[in-house]
């Protein structure tokens, strides 16, 4: 029975939870539902399910164990990251009135699913671009390295980002969407879906996506990006889509996904406290 449950989780968890969340969010957006509190509730339900499934069918059992108090710090990181996402959505709603609608640059009459997908493609390309730059620029890497510092990957890691790094990563894509006059609820739906996807992307969950792993940045592909050896981690930068990695030559796949002892930062110890971690990038030598 336990094996049967694990097999079901392995093959259906992402399609049912992430896919179901995407469909529900698009439906709510198309129906003109209020963003608050419905969309955050969908996100909370999706992330909670990922956290529970990790306990039932972990990819790496040791990664379910607290490492030197990192769970508390990671929870604070996730809370702050989600506040930033909510601020971005609020900004989309608030600034919509300032963008001249006569420009006609945003296809506001298109079906909602198309608007959400377009918002996602623009946002994701911006994230991919800034993500790659964050691995090249010394200062940006100092900020971004905090995200790569955990020696285990689990559902909370998606939010472990320095607030300044999060702003750098998301800023260009959001700016383009705001300048185009994107429908705010479409932006909100995509950001909500992305929050659920990020939990899956870093989840310590034994799940598979078959050939679709070549299109989406799920955990079995994203773990390569967190490899301890920096030279090996310059792959699979895509946040949701891996089409950018395909187009720009950073896609990587292999039969075996990195496990315990193979992720993190080489030769560097990260402070365990949240506030110390926020200061840490400015103390790093390289």
Image (cartoon, rainbow, N blue to C red):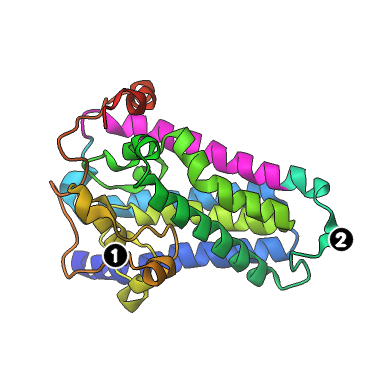
Does the magenta portion include 48?
Answer: no
Left or right for 43, reference 159? right
Residue 44, image x and y in percent? 50, 47
The answer to which of marks 2 and 1 sits earlier in the sequence is 2
41 sits to left or right of 243: right
Q: Main secondary structure of the magenta part?
A: helix
Q: Which residue is mark 1?
A: 207
> Which is more toward the observer, 282 or 225?
282
Which mark is drawn over residue 102? Answer: 2
Total marks shown come to: 2
The span picked out in magenta is 67-92
Q: Is residue 127 left or right of residue 249?
A: right
Q: Position of residue 99 (x, y in %)?
A: 80, 50
Q: Of the residues tagged 2 and 1, which is closer to the observer?
A: 2
* Quarter of the image that includes the N terminus: bottom left
Find out whether residue 80 is within the magenta segment: yes
Residue at the location (36% across, 43% down)?
156
**Where's residue 62, x and y in %?**
16, 45
Quarter of the figure that contains the C terminus? top left
Q: Is residue 184 above or below residue 266?
A: below
The answer to whether one can see residue 49 in this image is no
Q: CA distance from mark 2 to mark 1?
A: 46 Å
């Amino acid at each position: 029975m336990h094996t049967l449950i694990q097999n079901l989780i392995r093959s259906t968890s992402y399609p049912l939870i992430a896919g179901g969340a995407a469909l529900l969010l698009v439906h709510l957006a198309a129906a003109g539902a209020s963003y608050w509190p419905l969309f955050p509730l969908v996100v909370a339900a999706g992330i909670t399910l990922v956290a529970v499934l990790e306990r039932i069918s972990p990819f790496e059992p040791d990664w379910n164990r607290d490492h030197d108090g990192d769970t508390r710090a990671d929870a604070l990181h996730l809370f702050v990251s989600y506040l930033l996402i909510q601020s971005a959505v609020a900004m989309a709603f608030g600034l919509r009135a300032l963008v001249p609608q006569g420009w006609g640059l945003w296809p506001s009459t298109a079906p909602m699913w198309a608007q959400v997908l377009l918002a996602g493609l623009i946002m994701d390309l911006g994230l991919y671009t800034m993500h790659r730059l964050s691995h090249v620029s010394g200062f940006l890497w100092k900020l971004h390295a905090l995200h790569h510092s955990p020696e285990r990957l689990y559902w909370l890691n998606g939010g472990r980002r320095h607030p300044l790094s999060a702003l750098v990563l998301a800023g260009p894509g959001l700016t383009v969407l705001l300048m185009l006059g994107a429908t705010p609820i479409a932006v909100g739906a995509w950001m909500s879906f992305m929050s659920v996807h990020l939990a899956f992307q870093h989840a310590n969950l034994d799940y598979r996506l078959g050939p679709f792993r070549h299109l989406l940045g799920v955990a079995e592909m994203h773990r390569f990006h967190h490899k301890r050896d920096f030279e090996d981690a310059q792959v699979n930068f895509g946040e949701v889509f891996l089409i950018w990695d395909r187009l720009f030559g950073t896609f990587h796949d292999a039969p075996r996904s990195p496990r315990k002892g193979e992720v993190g930062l080489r030769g560097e110890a990260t402070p365990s406290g949240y506030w110390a971690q926020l200061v840490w990038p400015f103390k790093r030598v390289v």
